[in-house]
Amino acid sequence: MRHLTVVDHPLVQHKLTLLRMKQTPTAEFRRLVNEIALLLAYEITRDLPLEEVPIETPLMPARSKVLAGKKVCIVSILRAGDGLLEGMLDLIPSARVGHIGLYRDPVTLQPVDYYYKVPQDIAERPVIVVDPMLATANSAARAIARLKESGARDIKFACLLAAPEGLARMKEAHPDVPVFTASLDDGLDDHGYILPGLGDAGDRLFGTK
Ligand code: PRP
Ligand code: URA
């Protein structure tokens, strides 16, 4: 298993550059996050299991492949995770959806929990956790620990930007969880913001600055 996959497709890189620019307005920021989410979802679902089923084409009977097993569950870490959720659902419309409410205390950088709702049978589903930013990874590590308490075992994590510090923490806390990101950035500033980054993902998505 590869612990880190950087999805550096030219379309992803181009859209990410637009996303990073400080003058990009909210509506365009949201649209770009959606589009990148769809491209990340394409890569992250590459190893979903398939089974062969009998079908009839207009010309003849045939056997062809469809997705096997329980449907994927996408878990959004609120609130910025919801930006990625929409684009992923465009590609995987039948996915189940869970929400984990966490915000990062600006002083301690520790996550504060406020909401948790996931499908009861999450243990039987492939799970994709989404959050645009993997900074210290305190939020992602906490969310994944809670999902494991609910029985989830097959977990992947998708983000737009990851900091090396966050990746190291994820590898230590959850070595079994592969991370998919559109970019591995340079590091964190003194306030735990990713550099060069894109700023506060939640504020830019929802226009709350
Ligand atoms: C942001 C982001 C992650 C977290 C990443 O959320 O969406 O959840 O920070 O930082 P970490 O890796 O250091 O934990 P924030 O706490 O700003 O909440 P929001 O999504 O409600 O804006
Ligand atoms: N959360 C954000 O929204 N941006 C960062 O750079 C780090 C954490």
Image (cartoon, rainbow, N blue to C red):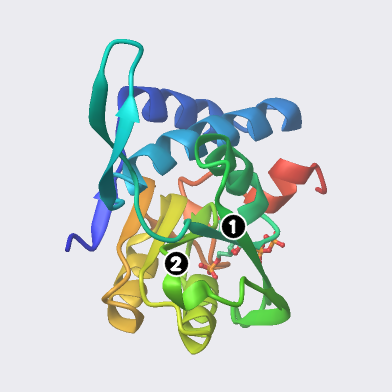
Horizontal and vertical percent for residue 112? 68, 81
Q: Is residue 32 above or below residue 69?
A: above
Element class at badge 1: strand
Residue 75 left/right relative to 41:
right
- Circles 2 and 1: CB atoms closer than 8 Å: yes
Q: At label 1, which amino acid type do we have?
A: Arg
Residue 115: in sight, yes or no? yes
Horizontal and vertical percent for residue 74? 54, 57
Furthest residue toward left = 1
Furthest residue toward top = 59
The quadrant holding residue 100 is bottom right
The quadrant holding residue 176 is bottom left
The quadrant holding residue 106 is bottom right
User: What's the distance in space between the residues labelled 2 and 1, CA to CA?
Assistant: 9 Å
Q: Is residue 29 above or below residue 103?
A: above
> In the image, what residue occupies the spot 43% across and 73% down?
124
> In the image, what residue occupies the spot 66% across and 51% down?
82
Q: Which residue is mark 2?
A: 125
Residue 110 left/right relative to 167:
right
Disc number at residue 96?
Answer: 1
Q: At label 2, which amino acid type do we have?
A: Arg
Report the front residue among 107 and 6: 6
Horizontal and vertical percent for residue 4? 25, 57
